[in-house]
Amino acid sequence: MSLSHSARDVAASRTQAPHTSMFVRMLVRAAVLRRGRALSALLAMVVAAAVTTAMLNLYVDVQAKLRREFRNYGANIILVGRDGASFPANALTQVESVLGGRGVVAPFALVVARTSDGQPVVVAGTDFDRARQLDRWWSVSDWPSAPQQALVGVRALSLVSPKNQPFDLSFQGHTIHLTSAGTVRTGAAEDSRVYLSLADFISWTGVRPSTIEVAASGSPEEISDIMRQLEQAIPAADVRPVRQIMEGEARVLGKTRATLLAAAALIILTAALCVLSTLMGWVFDRRRDFAIMKALGASDRLLNGFFAAEAAVLGASGAVIGFVLGVGIAAWIGRVNFHAPVVPRFSVLPFVLAGSIVVTLLSAVLPIWLLRRVQPAVILRGE
Amino acid sequence: MFARLVYESFRRQKRRKLLAGAAITLGVTVATAMIAVATDIGDKIDRELRTIGANLLVTPEEDTLDVEIGGVNLKPPSDGAFLNEADLPKIKGTFWHNNITGFAPMLPVNVALRRDGATDNLTLLGTYFAKRVSFGKEEFTTGVRSTHPWWKVSGAWPDENDNDNSRDVLLGERLAARLSAKTGDELTVSGRQLHVSGILSTGGAEDDQIVAPIALAQEILGKPGAVRRVYVSAITKPEDALARRDPRSMSGPVYDRWYCSPYPQSIAFQLQEAIPHSHAEQIRQVAQSEGVVLTRIEGLIFLITLAALFASALAVSAAMATAIFERRAEVGLMKALGAGKLAIASVFFAEATLLALFGGLVGFAAGGLLAHQIGRSIFDSQITIPPVLLPVILSIAVVVTFAGSAAAIRKAVRLDPVFALRGGL
């Protein structure tokens, strides 16, 4: 009595339930009833899609990230006045307008001055704030902050100011009185120079900058484009690339990207195989469902369609969740390693989506294809 | 009985065992290859970074200040101290000699170029191009062609090895354009007849100079064996807190660790020890920036290796879980016959161990091959796997296989034999 009562209830609730096709219901029930295995299949898919997304994102972004690191090497373009001539006063602003914020610029002016006991020493005038941004490898004890303060190279120090006392330098009869704010050590020519602020330098010597160093960021094409524009904007300048930096950068970027590609291929392959084995196990496990459907008269087309639809849904939802996760992983790697997040590339999504669906379809259709000739009765009997 | 169970399981279920074994092999292959690449990437990338130029500079200890603007030295040429060319091969006798990829001595001298009755004052730079040098029994070739690989020559590099009195020189490209000289021309420089064997393009100060074998520069200067400075290219490790410490303030073991690490500082220190009356220093632009770039690339590859390890662990676990899940009926039978949980679990774990060891061995070999291929195709050099890695990889494989099987085995063992045998859920 109670049984028929509840059966009637179920029947009543069924008639009131929104009409869904048998196909959709089968899909949903299959996922709900075996949620353990369905979840593990979905999990495998999500992880695979996430890892793939992260690798693709990194692969696309790593060039830009590494190029930024390479700007630690300083200038990759040098402008030199033709035949040692100085630049006009507006040259620096012209260079900056060509760059449009895509890099750092620092002017340098050089003369040979004499110390009070007549020794020659190279004195350079520069903009300390800019030099500091451009030449990040300079090891400076204290940057000058006031006029008449100099930054003295470690080797020049013993010549001009051995006891760190104020010193005089003279150039063509003009003398400047300086104090040493700090020392600079680079292991190169800078060590034997004395650096002044450009304002002090020009008012003392009257010599304007004849070298402008530019650290431009961008791809090789963008940089050669910048060089062409600089040549047009400042005809008085001889624009030269710093070849060793450019070549080294290109080589290292190329090799790193190739390594990354190899790693990405390996990881994506492993992830795809993981999905394949999990899903195939899942579908294979449900050969009884398959057999029942077949025994009830389902056509091969319907069966294929059912398992394919199931696989496609799994693949698509796994891909979308995995994409979000993967973008997160890539951003995290960017933050940890490059101190700048990797910008998500939505152009990657279609590839991940298509790849996921292909892999899931493959892993669903393969077992079905293997089982298609088997009689339902054999499977149902449990052999 | 136990051994027979395991043996028969392998004999009769070849397909399943092959599938699980293949998954383990693949996982271990990927893991081994990535670990090998990750451990070697620093070295490989550093070799590529050497294209940017030497990272160490050796100068005479008592040198006077350089007065140099735009590559033109205004200091009287005979002024200041020199290093002795005969001491240079000792660079290859330092502790880190295998990390030193090359060195190039430099000797700039001021020369007068006579042309059409007019005199032009120029700098002639004496150096090694690809000089054969021997230290002890070891022979090696070094010079600007390895330390300054961005120097490009149209024409031929002068040969400094067979002919000591070679008069072949390179002409900087801007200088050549100014003189409208070309390959094959003869120049009269400081009373000597020189032959231009090629035009040199560097993008730097050398474009305005004459570059010659060092013997010629020494002859013009009148100081045989004199060297003004030496550029040394060395594979280094990014500096850390230890590297920056002053070696004089270190205690014994710390000093040994510092001395035996390829920091720019410790290699410079050893160069200074090797070459009498010298001062060696890192060229910070190259050495420091290299450290930054290297750290980033190494970090990236390390993180990616973690991802690869994770992915392969997951693949192995998934394959194992599937393989065990398929064998519920067997578990049911064993239970029905009175096997305890422990007995059943140990059969499965023994199988997993065998699979892991076998797959691990094959995967290790395959991973080695793969790493070798990656090294050859990307870096044109060998990536070798230290054999020490084998036990590590094998134990990781066993642990991952165990972990992957554990959940599935637990589930299988818990299942009521009746359900398992009936083939239900």
Image (cartoon, coloured by chain):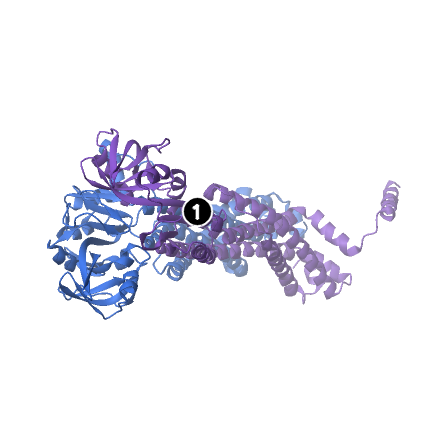
Counting labels gives 1
Tint of chain B: blue
> Residue A108 is drawn in which quadrant?
top left
For residue B16, above or below residue B408: below
Which residue has dot 1 on it? Answer: A90
Q: Looking at the image, which residue sits at the far front? A: A173
* Quadrant of image for the C terminus of chain A: bottom right
Structural crowding at the residue carrying mark 1, measured as other residues with C-alpha within 10 Å and reported as few (<14), some (14–19) or many (≥20): few
For residue B402, above or below residue B158: above
Q: Mark 1, chain letter? A: A
Q: Position of residue A295 (x, y in %)?
A: 75, 62
* Quadrant of image for the N terminus of chain A: top right
Question: Taking B98 as reference, is B4 left or right?
Answer: right
Q: Nearer the viewer, residue A334 or B406?
A: A334
Q: Nearer the viewer, residue A159 or B180?
A: B180
Q: Position of residue B70 (x, y in %)?
A: 29, 51
Residue A99 appears in the figure: yes
Q: Residue at x 69, y 59 (%)?
A: A307
For residue A260, above or below residue A209: below
Q: Residue at x 78, y 63 (%)?
A: A297
Identified by mark 1, the residue type is Asn
Residue B21 appears in the figure: no
For residue A330, above or below residue A144: below
Question: Taking B252 as reference, is B386 left or right?
Answer: right
Please give the letter of the chain rendered in purple: A
- What secondary structure is marked by label 1? loop
Q: Position of residue B341 (x, y in %)?
A: 55, 42
Q: Residue at x 58, y 57 (%)?
A: A276
Q: Position of residue A229 (x, y in %)?
A: 46, 56
